[in-house]
Amino acid sequence: MAGVRQFDEQQAYAAALDVFWTKGFRATSMLDLATATGVQRGSLYHAYGGKEQLFLRLFDQFANDFLARVAEALTPSDPREALLRFFDCCIASITTGSPSRGCLSTRTAVEADPGAVEDAVRKLLDDLEELVFEALSAAGLTVERREAARLVVAHTRALAVLERVYGDPARLRETAATLVSALVR
Amino acid sequence: MAGVRQFDEQQAYAAALDVFWTKGFRATSMLDLATATGVQRGSLYHAYGGKEQLFLRLFDQFANDFLARVAEALTPSDPREALLRFFDCCIASITTGSPSRGCLSTRTAVEADPGAVEDAVRKLLDDLEELVFEALSAAGLTVERREAARLVVAHTRALAVLERVYGDPARLRETAATLVSALVR
DNA sequence: CCCATGTTTGACAGTGGTGTCAAACATACC
DNA sequence: GGTATGTTTGACACCACTGTCAAACATGGG
């Protein structure tokens, strides 16, 4: 195979993801991505087809990394402990950076119009729910296990929005702790 | 006073709000607003100064209307009943229209960058929390009253995001019901 | 009835984005 | 080393939007 890609793809992925995360899917232009990655606009079109297709690749990697970290956080068998660590993990993810970048998937879900991008977010939430569901033991919950898992995932979305509005990690942890109190007997 | 506004301001407000609600703050252009209201772009600039200032006026009206409806829903003294009606009210607001328009304040909070617009959303959430707090009696809750109010308002944000992702009102009602179960003894 | 005042209009110049393409280029393979 | 193959580059044509402005306009008050 001759004609070989001249840029480091993983490095470009990281830079591009950072742009999407910081500016949001809609607001980032191909020019932004070109500048951040150091790859010419034309090359990006050639290599990936366009903004959405590039985003989908990045998001796939991001989602896998995130799910791995979540799975790790959910290991304690005590539901209270597991859930608190789970929420800490989510809050850490959305409050890093200065100013903090917020939640990539939530922002994407809210501002993207229906299509492959929205499907990707839905899949992430479904996967998240499944992880939480598996991690929870039925005993010790104040509501049915499936419902609890859904509510927990729902609350991650609430945290994402509140991070934008109040920008206060401590407040996010409090709200999460409240939910855990209400959910664990 | 000579030189008088030629268009019906309330009618223009309604049309403009609908555009913002449907397309989102960022994605709506002054041209969109001009088309929807039947008022020339230049006139809109002249009368209101620009997109953000116009939005703030609309949002203020919207917020007042919404809070009034919420207060009405929260009248029952039984916390379970009050909260379920409260969530029904919120869900109704975000699932009307076809396709449904979603939650104006959440969408705005997530896609607007810091500034007056974000402040307006924060104020709405603070007002909402206060209404819920006042409506709840301490007795019968599984967590402290202030915390409960915050969690309830937080959950409205979760519903807004989930509406975008799953587009299923029944599912939203289920999640809300789960939260109420966990929150009311 | 006229005039002062605020409104409306369409046009203007500027900005920033899009997607495509031919030509220049780099390189793995024979 | 030459060649085929895929990549990079910068330019091109196009579009949507912004904010402003002078001139045309409508109308209430004198």
Image: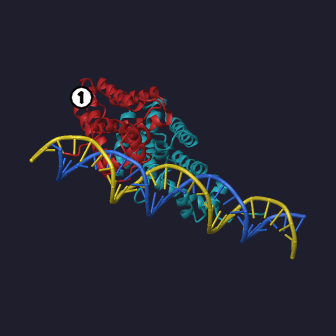
Chain colours: A cyan, B red, C blue, D yellow
Q: Disc 1 sits on a residue from what chain? A: B
Location of residue B39 in the rendering, given as x and y in whole percent from the top left corner: 36, 42
At x 59% / y 48%, what residue is drawn? A56
| Amino acid type for the residue under numbered disc 1 | Ala
Q: Is residue A9 left or right of residue D3?
A: left
Location of residue B170 in the rendering, given as x and y in whole percent from the top left corner: 45, 25
Q: Nearer the viewer, residue A172 or A84?
A: A172
- Vertical relation: B36 (above or below) B177: below
Q: Nearer the viewer, residue B14 or A122?
A: B14
Q: Is residue A41 left or right of residue C8?
A: right
Would you name the residue on which mark 1 appears? B139
- Vertical relation: A104 (above or below) B161: below
Q: Nearer the viewer, residue A141 or A161?
A: A161
Secondary structure beneath disc 1?
A: loop
Can I make out residue B169 in this image? Answer: yes
- Vertical relation: B93 (above or below) A97: above
Q: Is residue A136 left or right of residue B123?
A: right
Q: Say which quadrant the N terminus of chain B sits in.
A: top left
Location of residue A47 in the rendering, given as x and y in whole percent from the top left corner: 66, 56
Q: Say which quadrant the C terminus of chain B sits in.
A: top left
* Crowd class of label 1 (few under 14; some 14 to 19; many from 20; radius 10 Å): few
At x 54% / y 46%, what residue is drawn? A67
Can I make out residue A142 in this image? Answer: no
Location of residue B76 in the rendering, given as x and y in whole percent from the top left corner: 25, 23
Residue B147 location, quadrant = top left
Q: Nearer the viewer, residue A184 or D22?
A: D22
